Amino acid sequence: MPEAGRVSETELVACATPTDRTKVKDCAFRSGNVLELHDTRFAVLLHEAQTGKLVAQTSLDVKADGECPTLKSFETPRQIEDADPKQALVEFARPLVEP
């Protein structure tokens, strides 16, 4: 990720939208709140940062790490947490930006 003030060096912008989820675990907290951890399928679009031109698209299946967090802020008594797509996005985009 570019440093602040270096946005002009950004080559690609990724848009990842969850399209399907499979619950893998409930994390119950003493407050009574529950966090649902999900394996998640993402629809991914990669665009050129400067022009907005679509460069690539795919679907990524990302596994939840399965670990309940020690602390969590809740907006509702039961929340869904999708798997983190960051590493899968980097691996997908890498061939498009590295020589």
Image (spheres, helix red, strand yellow):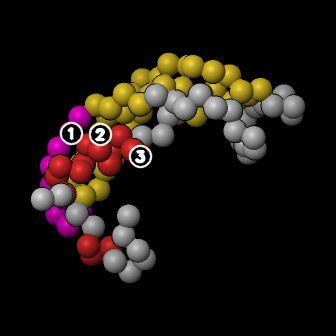
Can you tell which of label 1 and label 3 is closer to the viewer?
3
Marks 1 and 3 close (CB-CB < 8 Å): no
Residue 61 found in image quarter? top left
As measured in the structure, the alpha-carbon distance from the residue carrying label 1 to the one carrying label 3 is 15 Å
Q: Of the residues shown, which amino acid type is indicated by label 2? A: Val
**Magenta span covers which residues?**
48-58
Above or below: residue 25 compared with residue 57: above
Q: Of the residues shown, which amino acid type is indicated by label 3? A: Lys
Percent position of residue 58, x then y: 23, 34
Question: Which structural element holds mark 3?
Answer: helix
Q: Which residue is mark 1?
A: 57
Left or right relative to 31: residue 23: left
Kindly identify which numbered label has been placed on residue 44. 2
Q: Which residue is mark 3?
A: 86
Of callouts 2 and 1, the N-terminal one = 2
Percent position of residue 46, x then y: 24, 48
